[in-house]
Amino acid sequence: MIHPVHKMGLFGFILLAGAAAAIAQEPSLEEMLPGLKDRAVVLDIVSRVVEQNQEEVWNSTNSKVTIPGRPVGLKLVGANVVVLVQFTPYPNLASEGNAVLVAQVQIWINIPGEGIRYQTTMQTIPLKYGEQIYFFPLGSMNSPEDARIEIQLELRPYTGKEAGGDEAVGGTVSETPGNEINR
């Protein structure tokens, strides 16, 4: 298990970020079968990098329309760390208004003098539509003296009336002034 977030000088970051599927260009929702629109969901993602002094050094806001069983990916690249996260939503068929989000995480960390460490995890997260949850692929809220990556997630049904219209289809990345995001 990789804990030494504080050892790494980890978040001297220039990040690459995107809420995009891990593989190729995704078709828009309009290009999918019309019957899939009724099952579509929106995954709102707010990603933050918080340093040891609790200073937020980077953030990104993304919205992604997807269907159950189709993952939404997030890639964070720093000077000595790469974090790939895929969130795959599934409806909870036993309870209307509830869902399950499967989070798959891969982390590569280059620790000076020790080499590259790799860790992978998978977690199932039960949630209600509209509920905000926090996910920590690296670091923890319980260790405030350590740096961390914090991801806030909210899953909601797709209504077709999302703010930004078609921008919600395919996702958006908003850049906060002062943040450097290379694509």
Image (cartoon, helix red, strand yellow):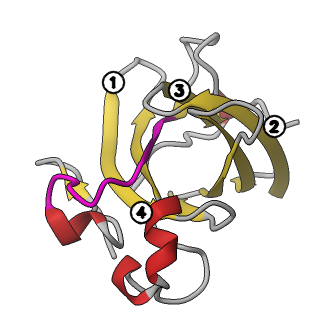
Q: Which residue is mark 4?
A: 65
State the image coordinates of residue 135 (x, y, percent, origin top left).
59, 32
* Element assignment for label 3: strand
Q: Which residue is mark 2?
A: 2
Apparent side of residue 87 relative to residue 120 in the rendered image (left or right):
left
Answer with mark 3 or mark 2, whichever residue precedes in sequence: 2
Residue at image position (33%, 24%) is: 55
Q: For residue 65, what is the image quadrant?
A: bottom left
| Front residue of this view, candidates 11 and 30 | 30
Residue at image position (16%, 52%) is: 163
Answer with mark 4 or mark 3, whichever residue precedes in sequence: 4
* Mark carried by residue 103: none
Q: Amino acid at mark 2?
A: Ile
Find the distance from the CA under tag 3 to the CA under tag 2: 23 Å
State the image coordinates of residue 22 (x, y, percent, origin top left).
60, 75
Apparent side of residue 47 relative to residue 137 in the rendered image (left or right):
left
Q: Which residue is mark 3?
A: 133
Residue at image position (40%, 89%) is: 31
Q: Amino acid at mark 4?
A: Val
* Element assignment for label 2: loop
Tell me the magenta residue range.
151-164
Q: Which residue is mark 1?
A: 55
Answer with mark 1 or mark 2, whichever residue precedes in sequence: 2
